Image (cartoon, rainbow, N blue to C red):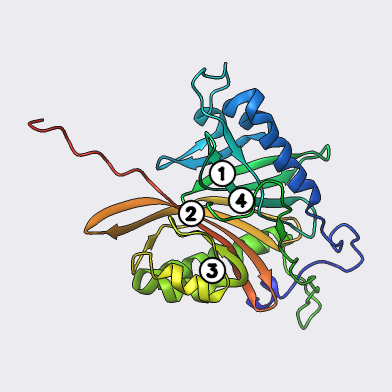
Amino acid sequence: MRALTFAAALIAASPVMAQTPDAAPVVAAERAFAADAPSMGVAGSFNKWSTPDAIVIGGGQVQRVRDAYPDGPRPADEPLLEWWPNFAGVSRSGDMGFTTGGVQVGGRRTGHYFTIWQRQPDGSWKWVYDGGSGASAADVPGPETEPAILEPGPQLVLAVGPNGERPAGVPSEWAMRDVTAREVQLARAAATDQRTAHLAAMADNGRLYVAPRPPAIGRAAFAEALSAWPATFRFGPTEGGGASRYGDLVWTYGTAAWERDGQARTGHYVRLWQRQEGGWKIVLAQLIAAPIAAPPPAGG
């Protein structure tokens, strides 16, 4: 039965599921979202472009967007937040996409954002996840450039068992189940050697954010960047995420813990997985560290 789980997929006659994906609408949505920030402010633009149950990860917390950014008048002293896509992609079913790229606050480049987008029943795009990384944006292409586009994974071929049986469920369910299992394998391996574990899971065409370094692109860059992370991580189980209808893209998030310079640290991992010819691979990995707790005041 395991062979039926994801050595499977859609009937070729399904035109929606077999289409060649176009990431342009996702990129356009991200640019429109960013364009609203100067006039609407952070809370206004974030609430306008997100689904009601969208989440943001930052400050060591997973929060609904409306809790993280209560809608209201823009603070007079709010700095200008700007961002733009450098890397983007969309599922073959055209219902899920992502963009990531540089961020500026008050005119100073500060890091990278990563957004997961979901196509709505009316055809519009809303984001369901947004989170930042301290990976350097100093030398990434600017907002006037077009983003690199993730190449789509292979089309799926329906597999049946020896008696003509087909796997139960739908591709998104198969994909989420398989990727959750891959997360368990990655967590187990990262507990003893995170560098080797991540190298085995990363896609050749993926991107890895290891702050404060620039985005790592390509296997040589992955190996170098991973050497800057602690030797081991304790990754918690998958807490949430989602899969495309076609079952070719899956995003996940969960808790992470590690030690740096003798100090215990915590945070969250966020990963985007793509089904490729060799199986499930990570095309974007992000670690969002929680703030370091301030020491208690002297004498108190």
Depicted 199 relative to depicted 20: above or below: below
Q: How many marks?
A: 4
Which amino acid lies under the numbered mark 4 shown in the image of this protein? Gly
User: Could you tell whether 27 is left or right of 251 in the image?
Assistant: right
- Determine which residue is flagged by label 3: 182
Marking on residue 101: 4
Of mark 3 and mark 1, the one earlier in the sequence is 1
- Determine which residue is flagged by label 2: 135
**Image x and y of residue 140, in percent:** 59, 55
Of mark 1 and mark 2, the one earlier in the sequence is 1
Mark 2–mark 4 distance (CA, rounded to whole Å): 10 Å
Of mark 2 and mark 4, the one earlier in the sequence is 4
Of badges 3 and 4, nearer the viewer stands 4
Marking on residue 103: 1
Mark 3–mark 4 distance (CA, rounded to whole Å): 26 Å
Which amino acid lies under the numbered mark 3 shown in the image of this protein? Arg
Question: Secondary structure under badge 3?
Answer: helix
Question: Secondary structure under badge 1?
Answer: strand
Of badges 3 and 2, nearer the viewer stands 2
